[in-house]
Amino acid sequence: MTTIFNVEDFSEIAKDVISGEDLPPSHPAVHEKFNAAMKNIPGFSRGWMEVRGALEADGYALLKVEKLNVLPLGFIRDLAILLTHQIGTPNPAGVFREAAGALIPSSAIAVDVRPRRSGNRHDPSTVDGAAPLHTDSSFSLKPERYFGLWCVNPAETGGESVLIDSREVVGELRKLSGGERCIDILSNCNLPLWMESKSMPVRILTEPGSSRAIVRFHESRIARGIIDKELPDSDPRVQALCLFMKILSSERFSRVVPLDRDEVLFIDNHRMIHGRRDFSDRNRHMLRIRMT
Ligand SMILES: O=C(O)CCC(=O)C(=O)O
Ligand SMILES: [Fe+2]
């Protein structure tokens, strides 16, 4: 389901913020002005109700913030963070930023997803190409519930999001011979997840089928973790993972979602597994905001 959300005459609001008092991005007065302007946008509350409804029903929602890109990037960040509060509480992420050729650790709420010179191929937000199927913060016991991908500039071709609903995967498993055992293993045993220098345990399914269900997954990090721990193919956890992966790789359960400029994709990170199709355009630029 696609929810289109129009911000009427957004450029008028933007003009006021940008030229009115020459305010820099992140200035509290910018936030105040945006907040005040939003209240006057027709259909604002109803639009967000639709977005939250789609997120609840489908595990993801697509939103269009018309003319978002008339704003300079700093103000897009501000507005994206403010609008994110309509879904959840934005969560700062530890990131590295490049300054004078060095990587400096910092904390950011709106994280750039953009290929860069210092990119790390294990972190899809820093490189071009396809991203493996995963859930965000799969290493964490309590991954963020939602995240939003804000499209500043789409790739010329490719880079679409791929979404798989873990509820459908569990439903399909229940129909297959050996499927109940697979669910049992994945929800009671840990698999190794490779984190740069060592593996750590990850439980792929938590309380599947319940309202507290959480899926945690990372295709390439778990594959690397299995090598690290030298788990044989005969290990029941490896066999359960293979059956799970077989369903993930069946196109029947994949939704391909292209994101255009000014569009935002919200994803329920406890329910949906996501990936990204291949792209090579180094000007592709998204902002990612995770929420608790
Ligand atoms: O680039 C994208 O579309 C998604 C990137 C992603 O999944 C991530 O940074 O965790
Ligand atoms: Fe991701």
Image (cartoon, rainbow, N blue to C red):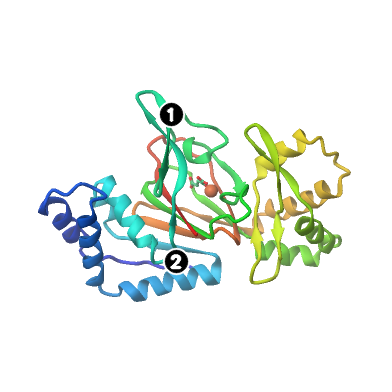
- In the structure shown, which secondary structural element does the residue marked by tag 2 occupy? loop
Q: Position of residue 119 (x, y in %)?
A: 48, 31
Nearer-the-camera pick, 163 or 232: 232
* Sequence-wise first label, 1 or 2: 2
User: Observer-nearest residue: 137 or 242?
Assistant: 137
Q: Is mark 2 within 8 Å of ligand 1?
A: no
Within-10-Å neighbours for mark 1: few <14, some 14–19, many 20+: few
Residue found at the far top of this picture:
101
Element marked by disc 1: strand
Find residue 38 and report its horizontal and vertical position in percent.
25, 67
Between disc 1 and disc 2, the foreground one is 1
Classify mark 2: residues with Cα within 10 Å, few (<14), some (14-19) or many (20+).
Answer: few
Q: Is residue 246 above or below residue 42?
A: above
List the residue tagged with mark 2.
2
What's the residue at 47%, 46% (across, down)?
A: 93
Q: Residue at x 11, y 52 (%)?
A: 21
Horizontally, is 159 left or right of 192 in the view? left
The disc placed on residue 38 is none
Residue 86 position in % (x across, y down): 39, 67
Distance between the Cα atoms at labels 1 and 2? 38 Å
The residue at the point 27 percent across, 65 percent down is 7
Task: Describe residue 212's horizontal placement relative to residue 152 as left or right.
Answer: right
The relative height of residue 82 versus residue 96 in the rendered view (above or below) is: below
Residue 238 screen position, x and y as percent: 81, 46
Q: Which residue is mark 1?
A: 103
